[in-house]
Amino acid sequence: MGVQTLTRWPLILAIWAAGLGVAAQYGKISVIFDRMGALYPDAGAGVSFTVSLVGIVGIIFGVVAGLFVSSIGYRRSLIWSLWLGAAMSGLQALHPPFELFLLTRLIEGLSHLGVVVAGPTLIAALSSYKDRGLAMTLWSTFFGVAFTLLAWFGLPLVRSAGVLSLFAAHAVVMAALAFWLGLALRDVPVPARRPFPAWSSLPALHVPIYRSPWMAAPAAGWLFYTCCFVSILTVIPPHIAPELRGFVLGAMPLASIATSMILGVALMRRFTAVQVTQVGFLASGAGVIWLWLVPGDPIACIALAGAMGLVQGASFAAIPQLNAGDSERAQAGGILAQAGNLGNTIGTPLMVLALSLAGFSGLMAVLLTLFLCGFLAHQILAQKRRAPPG
C-alpha cells in the first residue's frame, strides 16, 4: 500500500467504532458482573471466568494473531471478527447453559484479537504522516469510551429490560458495524497480505519478534501501563471519600482520554511517541507520590489518570513510528494486545496482594515501581535501537 497523503477520517472513525464494539466484549460483562450470579446461580466461583476467558485468548495467541491477520488480510480479519462477535453475543442473548456461555466468551477472545490487531494497522495505513499520531491516539481511547457508553446506556437498558437485552443489543451493534465496514472498506486499498508461516515454525518466530526493539517496544511499556490502569480503578475507590467516589471514578477515564487526545497529540508534533510515553510514565510516577502523600485526594486521583493518558495514546502511536512495514505493525499490535491482556490479568491480583501485605503504602510502592519500570523499559529498548547492528 502506498504512502497515504490524505487522512481518510470517515473510515478511521468507522474502524474506531469497531474498536468500541470489541471493547464492549470486556465491558458488557464488567458492568453487570454483580448480576451474573443471578443469571447463572449454579456457576459459583466459575462466574469469574466470564471476564477472564476473553483475555486469556489474547495472552496465548497475541503474536500468532499478528501473523494470522497479515496472512488472511486486514480488511477480511476486521469484518469476519465483527461478524463472529455478533454471532457470539446473539447466542449469549438466548441464555445458553453456562458451559456454552463460557465457550462463547472464549470465541469472543478470538473476535477481539482480530479487531485489535487489524484495526490499528488499517488506521495507520489510512492516515497521512502528519495526522497519524492523532489517529492512533483516537484508537487508543476505544476501551475507555466503550466503558463510559456502557455505563451511560447499557446499565439503563439492563435495569429496564434485563441482562440478556444487553447481549442482544451488543449483537445488533456488532452486526451493524460488520455490515457498515464491509461496504465502506470494499473498494479501499489495504495493506498487502503475507503468507502464513508453517505452524512448526511459530515457536521460533516468536523469539525475533520479542527481541526486536522496534516491534516489542510499544508492548513493553504497555504491559506496565495495563498492570496499573484497571487495577487503580479497582483498588483505589475505597480510599476516596464516599460522597466523591462516583464523580472521581467517572472523571478518571475521561481525564485520561482528554490528556491523550489534547496534550499527547500536541506533544507528539514535537517529540517522538516513545518520548511522550516516557514523559507519561514519569508524570504517572509523580501522581503516585502525590496520592501517596494525600491518600484518596480527588485531584490527585484525576491527575494520575490524566498522566496515564499520555502513555495510552503515545503507546499506540509508537507502533507505526517504529515499524514502517504493515506486517511488522500487525506483529507489533499482536504483541501489544498480548501484553495488554497479560497486564489486565495480573494487575489487580498484584495490587490486592500488595494492599493486603503492606497496606496503602505497599500499593503505592508497587505502582511507583511499575511506572518507573515502564520508563526504563523504553529507555533500554531505545538504546538498543541506536546501537549499531551486529
Image (cartoon, helix red, strand yellow):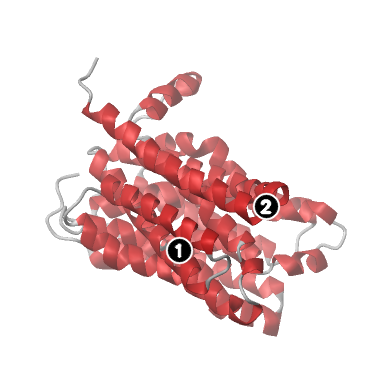
Q: Is residue 323 above or below residue 270?
A: above
> Which residue extends farthest left?
5
325 and 282: which is toward the camera = 282
Find residue 78 and report its horizontal and vertical position in percent: 41, 52
Which numbered disc covers residue 162? none
Residue pictured at 48% horizontal, 52% vertical: 81
In the picture, measured across the screen, residue 109 lies left or right of residue 125, that is right
Find residue 86 and report its horizontal and vertical position in percent: 55, 61
> Which residue extends farthest bottom?
160
Find residue 87 and report its horizontal and vertical position in percent: 59, 59
Q: Secondary structure at mark 2?
A: helix
Within-10-Å neighbours for mark 2: few <14, some 14–19, many 20+: some
Find residue 92 and report its horizontal and vertical position in percent: 68, 62
Disc 1 residue type (three-letter): Ala
The residue tagged 1 is 305
Within-10-Å neighbours for mark 1: few <14, some 14–19, many 20+: many
Whether residue 332 is visible, yes or no, is: no
Residue 239, located in which quarter of the rendered image? Answer: bottom right
Q: Is residue 84 above or below residue 301?
A: above
The residue tagged 2 is 355
Separation of residues labelled 2 and 1 (CA atoms):
20 Å
Residue pictured at 72% horizontal, 50% vertical: 356
In the picture, measured across the screen, residue 18 lies left or right of residue 297, that is left
Whether residue 156 is visible, yes or no, is: yes
**Quadrant including the C terminus:** top left
Residue pictured at 25% horizontal, 29% vertical: 385
> Which residue extends farthest top?
390
